[in-house]
């Protein structure tokens, strides 16, 4: 047994469970592919400053959770704790915004890293699928992304999730609210770190999950009461478009999300079957992020959905996904000549799109048939010396147990017909 184990707060994806994770990623990505979003992949690490500026120096992600390190060459890098800043950086570096077709619509899938206290649904290494629409300020884009996420979840069979929606205002109206909130927070009995956070970004305090803090926030001013007319109009149009699409949501005036770059529309997908880690995904508009990281003004909106937590949500609802069989046909050769003939047939089946496997290692009939059973294959091909002499293969239906002899040269066509 190996003396090494996966690092604390991480996990390995191992068959057969890993097939569910792959299916979830595919289901989330499918609506995006059909809506003009192109795939992007960024490095697993970036310059520390990218996240310090974009995510926010006062956030827990940057101050406590980011894996930061210095390379031998003296560069300060960080494992990516989220996807948006990296995707926007890549789009700017490649000048995608100058191609003349805005918004730039991108989707991605990958691993992210945060040094958090491990618990069910919260890991130090986790997987997300995300989408970003860069370079356009349009309520229809915000609505589109909310609708696509809802579509992805429902395609998986989830029904017990809720969509929370709010507006965080913009650079015109948020400063007024920020000042009012700071005045309120200064009158509370808060620890020094929280008071310091309130001076840097008071909205972050609203996102504090500690009960002692939440109790004191009763009566705190709400941002919706400070929205300017433009933000009110924008938010109302998002609400109307989402409603017209038949997607239900709940207005949550306290929803702020955990990152500093959000403006106007912000939303979260929660599942009450997951306990304290109820958020399965979320996102919003981040109109000022491009300028924060040195780019031009590019109003944008996006989201990220957690693959790990979506799998937990499926388990909480008792939803089992219909996963394609990893193996449809399992070949069992008895003897060297049979091994050569069947291996060629397995190769031909695979070329024709049939999932096929082979009894490797020279197993005897009993052991090979056990392997065929464990593979989940619908059919087994058994070929012995007598069968070879007669030019046939024994085709066994693993569900019914029925076995028939089929000509060696006809077996591929027979299996294709049976498997549809």
Image (cartoon, rainbow, N blue to C red):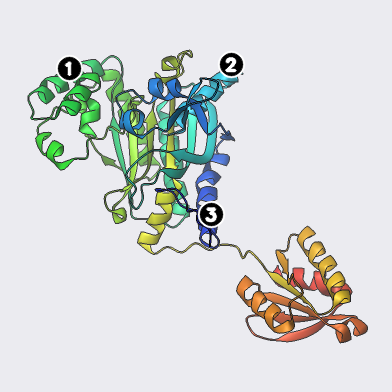
Note whether residue 262 is visible: yes
Q: Which residue is mark 2?
A: 98
Please tell me whether mark 1 sits on a helix, a strand or a loop: helix
Q: Which residue is mark 3?
A: 23
Farthest-out residue, front: 3
Give coordinates of residue 83: x percent, y percent: 47, 33
Do the numbered discs 2 and 3 sit on residues whose CB atoms are within 8 Å? no
Distance between mark 2 and mark 3 Cα atoms: 35 Å
Give the left or right position of residue 293, taking residue 196 as reference: right
Please tell me whether mark 2 sits on a helix, a strand or a loop: helix
Please tell me whether mark 3 sits on a helix, a strand or a loop: helix
Name the foreground residue: 41 vs 238: 41
Vertically, is 409 above or below 170? below
Give coordinates of residue 51: x percent, y percent: 42, 25
Label 2 neighbour load within 10 Å: few <14, some 14-19, many 20+: few
Q: Which of the two discs, 1 and 2, sits closer to the camera? A: 1
Label 3 neighbour load within 10 Å: few <14, some 14-19, many 20+: some
Q: Which residue is mark 1?
A: 179
Give the left or right position of residue 7, taking residue 340 as reference: left
Q: Quadrant of residue 300?
A: top left
Residue at the (15%, 21%) spot, across then down: 182
């Amino acid at each position: 047994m190996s003396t090494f184990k996966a690092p604390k707060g991480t996990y390995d994806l191992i068959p057969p469970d890993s097939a569910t994770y792959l299916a979830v990623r595919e289901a989330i990505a499918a609506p995006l592919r059909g809506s003009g979003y192109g795939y992007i992949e960024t490095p697993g690490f970036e310059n520390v400053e990218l996240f310090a500026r974009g995510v926010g120096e006062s956030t827990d992600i940057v101050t406590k959770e980011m894996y930061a390190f210095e390379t031998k060459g003296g560069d300060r890098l960080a494992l990516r704790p989220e996807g948006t800043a990296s995707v926007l950086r890549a789009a700017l570096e490649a000048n995608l915004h100058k191609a003349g077709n805005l918004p730039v619509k991108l989707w991605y899938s990958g691993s992210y890293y945060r040094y958090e206290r491990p618990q069910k649904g919260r890991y130090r290494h986790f997987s997300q699928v995300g989408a970003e629409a860069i370079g356009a300020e349009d309520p229809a884009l915000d609505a589109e992304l909310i609708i696509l996420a809802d579509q992805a979840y429902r395609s998986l069979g989830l029904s017990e999730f809720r969509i929370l929606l709010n507006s965080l205002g913009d650079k015109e109206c948020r400063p007024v609210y920020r000042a009012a909130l700071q005045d309120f927070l200064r009158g509370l009995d808060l620890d020094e770190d929280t008071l310091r956070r309130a001076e840097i970004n008071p909205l972050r305090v609203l996102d504090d999950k500690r009960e002692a803090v939440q109790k004191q926030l009763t009566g705190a001013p709400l941002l919706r009461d400070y929205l300017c007319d433009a933000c009110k109009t924008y938010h109302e149009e998002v609400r109307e478009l989402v409603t017209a699409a038949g997607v239900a949501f709940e207005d949550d005036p306290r929803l702020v999300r955990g990152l500093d770059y959000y403006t106007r529309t912000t939303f979260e997908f929660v599942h009450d079957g997951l306990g304290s880690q109820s958020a399965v995904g979320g996102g919003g508009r981040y109109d000022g992020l491009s300028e924060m990281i040195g780019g031009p003004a590019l109003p944008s909106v996006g989201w990220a959905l957690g693959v790990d937590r979506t799998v937990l949500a499926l388990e909480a609802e008792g939803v089992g996904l219909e996963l394609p069989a990893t193996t449809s046909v399992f070949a069992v050769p008895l003897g060297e000549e049979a091994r050569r003939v069947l291996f060629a047939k397995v190769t031909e089946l695979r070329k024709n799109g049939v999932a096929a496997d082979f009894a490797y290692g020279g197993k005897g009939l009993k052991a090979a048939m056990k392997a065929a059973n464990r593979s989940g294959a619908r059919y087994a091909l058994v070929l012995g010396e007598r069968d070879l002499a007669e030019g046939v293969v024994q085709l066994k239906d693993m569900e019914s147990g029925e076995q028939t002899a089929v000509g060696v040269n006809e077996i591929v066509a027979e299996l294709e017909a049976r498997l549809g």
